[in-house]
Image (spheres, rainbow, N blue to C red):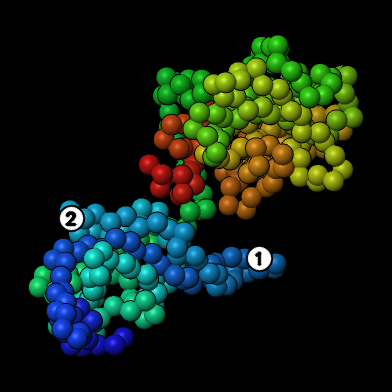
């Protein structure tokens, strides 16, 4: 960085002058403030596994400008509400800061030994170490006073996609309350009612019904309903996948049409047709488990949690979201999410329970 307090004096002091015989008076603004702050592109170390299962790392870019910074003018604090991804390197960060009324910015940096401070003129092309909070000083145009801001760049200390299971002891009332969170209609007629269908009603599920609600990112007044279940094994023995239907519900059109996600050969990531199928919404995800495959589906019971990130269109087994080890695959299991962003797996035969969560689901609380 270009050091020296003298540069500040040069940048903020304006001298009045005479042009021909007309005197020009310079007016200085005595107030100023930091008006915006953003980060440039940053580097992040990502830990993953190679194709052989060995741990490996690679470096990815993080677009710093996509993480908005709040400026608390009263307390002089600047910080990002949404933390940067874990392992983001903020020790050599480029930032863009603007001030009102042509003020100037100096940064109060500490020497390596931490024994003294050094005022440095801010430059949008110089990197700054934000591994600790940094003091910014915004001087008014005349240089007579300044406002101090502490800039804190927050970085997650956990991997948001890490998932944790732990066994839990529940009372009978607690278990009953959790099981009551399931939305499993007794028949499809009470779900569909008089709503229109975009295809033949023969594709509607009739057993193992699950009805879940997902928020819409585009509207706070609308949501998506997802109906998942199986068709009759006696009438549709050739089925290998569950039946998934969807509709948008808003205040203006409560009788919106149901749309069927038609099983196709091109979609190789469909939800298997499993006995005792259970589906729950977890944030913006749909999670599903089930027992033995039905009909033409040869699925082994309770081998995986199936995850859908696109409202039920495709389903995948995720390495980071799996079932706890040692569960009884011969029992029926319930999968529910509570208001505290916990995921519960409950053996409905033995009443054994596990509590799990994704780190990032806890960050929202």
Residue 310 found in image quarter:
top right
Q: Position of residue 80 (x, y in %)?
A: 35, 57
Seen at 23% across and 74% down, the residue is 104
Q: Specify which label sits upstream in the sequence, 2 or 1.
A: 1
Q: Nearer the viewer, residue 90 or 55?
A: 90
**Image: 136 above or below 79:** below
Seen at 14% across and 74% down, the residue is 25
Quadrant where the C terminus is found in the figure: top left
Question: Label for residue 53?
Answer: 1
- Local crowd at mark 2 within 10 Å, few (<14), some, or many (≥20)? few
Q: Position of residue 218 (x, y in %)?
A: 55, 38
Q: Nearer the viewer, mark 2 or mark 1?
A: 2
Question: Label for residue 75?
Answer: 2
Residues tagged 2 and 1 counted as in contact (Cβ below 8 A): no
Seen at 55% across and 73% down, the residue is 59
Q: Nearer the viewer, residue 53 or 21?
A: 21
Looking at the image, residue 306 sits to the left or right of residue 62; the answer is right
Looking at the image, residue 24 sits to the left or right of residue 62; the answer is left
């Amino acid at each position: 960085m270009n050091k020296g307090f003298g540069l500040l004096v040069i940048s903020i002091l304006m001298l009045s002058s005479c042009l021909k015989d007309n005197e020009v008076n310079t007016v200085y603004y005595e107030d100023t403030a930091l008006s915006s702050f953003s980060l440039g592109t940053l580097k992040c170390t990502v830990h993953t596994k190679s194709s052989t299962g060995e741990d490996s790392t690679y470096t990815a870019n993080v677009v710093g400008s996509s993480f908005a910074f709040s400026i608390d003018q009263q307390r002089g604090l600047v910080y990002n509400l949404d933390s940067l991804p874990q392992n983001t390197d903020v020790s050599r960060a480029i930032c863009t800061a603007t001030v009102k009324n042509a003020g100037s910015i100096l940064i109060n940096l500490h020497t390596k030994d931490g024994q003294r401070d050094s005022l440095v003129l801010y430059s949008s092309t110089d990197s700054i170490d934000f591994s600790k909070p940094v003091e910014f000083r915004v001087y008014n145009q005349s240089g007579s006073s300044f406002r101090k801001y502490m800039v804190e760049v927050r970085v997650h200390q956990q991997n948001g996609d890490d998932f944790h299971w732990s066994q839990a002891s529940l009372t009978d009332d607690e278990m009953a309350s959790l099981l009551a969170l399931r939305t499993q209609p007794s028949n499809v007629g009470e779900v569909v009612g008089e709503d229109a269908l975009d295809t033949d009603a023969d594709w509607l599920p009739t057993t193992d019904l699950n009805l879940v609600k997902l928020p819409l990112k585009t509207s706070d007044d609308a949501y998506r309903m997802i109906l998942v279940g199986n068709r009759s094994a006696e009438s549709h023995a050739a089925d290998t996948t569950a039946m998934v239907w969807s509709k948008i519900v808003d205040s203006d059109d409560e009788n919106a049409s149901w749309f069927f996600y038609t099983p196709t050969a091109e979609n190789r990531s469909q939800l298997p047709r499993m006995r005792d199928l259970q589906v729950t919404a977890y944030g913006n995800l749909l999670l599903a488990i089930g027992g033995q495959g039905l009909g033409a589906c040869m699925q082994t019971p309770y081998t995986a949690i199936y995850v859908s990130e696109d409202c039920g269109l495709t389903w995948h087994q995720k390495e980071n979201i799996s079932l706890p080890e040692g569960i009884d695959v011969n029992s029926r299991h319930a999968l529910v999410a509570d208001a505290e962003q916990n995921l519960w797996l409950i053996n409905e035969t033995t009443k054994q329970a596990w509590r799990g969560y994704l780190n990032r689901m806890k960050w929202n609380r």
